[in-house]
Amino acid sequence: MTWMPGETLLTRIWESIEKLGSGLASPMQIKREGRARAEVRAYEIQCEDKARQEIAERIAMTRHPPDATPQMARLLSPTNIQTNSSNLELECAAEQGVGPVISQAILAQRSQNLRKLCNLRQVIRILEEEIENSDSEQEIHPFDEDWLNSWREGAEKVSNEHMQRLWARILSGESKNSGSFSMRTLEFIKSMGTEDAKLIEKAAKLFTKNMYFIKMKEENLRKWLTVREIVDLTDMGIISGSHGLNGLIWPVSVGPGKETPIFFNNEQFALILFSNHDYTAEIPVYSVSRMGQEILGLGKFKTPDEFVKDCGLSLGHLNTGVILAKINEIPETDEIYLDPYEKFF
């Protein structure tokens, strides 16, 4: 039997996923029945295409049912159908002679459930792809049942492929390191709007490796983030400990023979602080909250070269030397060295 990268991890995740009732054939089931994985997945995708067509047809029926009255339209609204799981109002309507609405309401509820199932199955398929493309096995941690149910609520509501990949990465990350994503983070992502996501992505490029945002002079800051955006990031809980707009202090020790580098998500440039005497530089910063770090860990972001330079220019008040340095790799090793490129102060 040929070993596949990530197979152990995938199998253990499936042991939890099967409890969600996705209806997908798991790797274990495929092996037992001797079917090729590609063949099974192709058949499942074909079935889901038919299901999506059925959803569209059902939605059309519920939006324009025959002989619809204002009362029927209200009962068939998505909000009403979703929030009245007991169908008490529908039963009352039936007693009042509004019988035709019952079948339409049930049809709408089934369509909604079918849409959720299709979304969940797609997220799981993306998860399979990402794990199978990994090149190593890792220790696997069991899922908390409440956490898994919360994850499902988020995954089954999204039909956008970008968001589906996000939910797939969340489950994969949690399986490798239990507690990687808190329940608070899951709830935030469930309610995250498009504009929120764009702002987080914009800010994610500007943090240091140790998750600080160096506070700049206002004329430099506005090139990257506005004061309003910093306030919004604080309100969202992405930036923590900002105490209004004053920020925090990041103490950095420097001294003779003790050059201290500051790294960003940039493979070309870093900053170096140095001094001829022992000194603790106090750098004004905003820090990233735990939830913010969890969310930023879902993507890969590159800090612009110009931003690294602007950060260096903003540190002139520290009474230390500041150098912009190029990052160079040492051949055949994982080590690097910093080559001074431009001295600011």
Image (cartoon, rainbow, N blue to C red):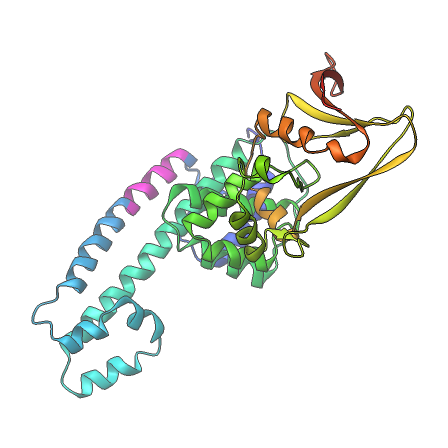
Question: Is 40 part of what is drawn in magenta?
Answer: yes
5 left or right of 79? right
**Residue nearest the viewer, comparing 241 with 140:** 241
Which of the two residues, 291 or 155, is positioned nearer the viewer here?
291
Q: In terms of secondary structure, what is the magenta stretch mainly?
A: helix
Considering every residue shown, the one lying at the far top of the view is 331
**What is the x, y in percent for residue 110?**
28, 63
Quadrant in which residue 176 is drawn: top right
Q: Position of residue 16 (x, y in %)?
A: 55, 54
Quadrant in which residue 38 is drawn: top left
Residue 36 in view here: no
Give the quadrant of the N terminus.
Answer: top right
Question: For this rendering, which residue is in front, 330 or 327?
Answer: 327
Q: Which residues are magenta?
A: 38-48
Which image quadrant for residue 140? top right
Image coordinates of residue 252 in percent, x first then y, are 81, 38
* Residue 328 appearing in the image: yes
- Is 74 drawn above or below residue 31 in the view shown? below
**Residue visible at 71% across and 20% down?**
325
Quadrant showing the C terminus: top right
In the rendered image, residue 215, in percent from the top left (x then y), is placed at 66, 41
Q: Is residue 55 magenta?
A: no
Vertical placement of residue 301 versus 334, above or below: below
In the image, residue 244 sits, relative to residue 1, either above or below, namely below
Which residue appears farthest toward the left when viewing the image?
A: 67
Q: Residue at x 29, y 73 (%)?
A: 80
